Amino acid sequence: MSRIVGLVGGLGPESTIDYYRRIIARWQKYEPDSSPRLVIDSLDFRLGIRLVEDDRAALVEYLMDSIRRLAGAGVHLVAMTANTPHIVFDELAAHSPVPMLSIVETCADEARARGLRRLALLGTRFTMEAPFYPAAFARRGIAIVPPDDQDRPWVHERYLGELVPGVFKDETRERFVALIERLKAETGIDGVILGGTELPILLQAPVVAGLPMLDTTELHVQAIVSEARRRT
């Protein structure tokens, strides 16, 4: 039988729904007469953000409780349906009772396969400022370029205030495109990491301002389905 996938969801709800739909759609490209076996443990996004901000040790325990519930439900692997919680991925993976699949490592592998060398990173402030993306990409000889100090607050506010609650405005999309164009002109980036799993819902084109968009949700989903199709 195929492996059972556990998803740490709710971080936020829109991206969890997107993961669910994409996993089923990708699975059925290979096995159209069946569906994947999934278990989702949905967490409180607002609590998660508060813990990222104020108490990383409590964040680890909050996420580990979810992983333990999924393991108790019989899953064979776990993926977190958001980038920001990967800020403590190493601590979680070290103690998880089942293997975990990193969205960051998956994206870094794709960037290396495409020959990209300098990538903008968009996401929450926590993701844009934390070392977990730069460290993973540096191991592959790839530089990460976050927006500057003036642009990061705007990206963070739009992300938490609009995208996570499921609000996707044309004017916000246009401003993101303008930001990408400016980063391309000013920093010489050759691609963009959509390092928040709501961003691919807002920016659905595979190329923006002449640059490839690395859709972290899609790349993660591809890896999840590949692992799920391995037989137990």
Image (spheres, rainbow, N blue to C red):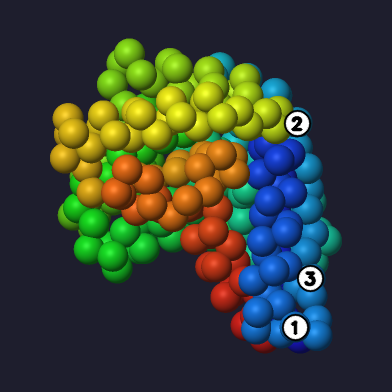
In the rendered structure, the answer to whether residue 136 lies left or right of residue 36 reads left
The quarter of the displayed image where residue 32 is located = bottom right
Q: Which residue is mark 1?
A: 32
Is any atom of residue 127 visible in this view?
A: no
Pointer 2 residue: 44
The amino acid marked with disc number 1 is Pro
Which element type, helix, strand or loop, lies under badge 2? loop
Give the spatial CA distance, label 2 vs label 1: 33 Å
Numbered label attached to residue 37: 3
Q: Amino acid at mark 3?
A: Arg
Q: Residue at coordinates 68% horizontally, 75% vertically from top-left?
A: 27
**Circle 1 sits in a helix, a strand or a loop, which is it?**
loop
* Residue at x 24% of width, y 57% of height: 116
Disc 3 crowd rating (10 Å Cα; few below 14, some 14-19, many 20+) is some
Camera-side mark, 1 or 3 = 1
Label 3 and label 2: CA atoms lie apart by: 23 Å
**Residue 101 pos. (x, y %):** 54, 60
The N terminus - image quarter: bottom right
Would residue 115 be seen by someone viewing this image from the given angle?
yes
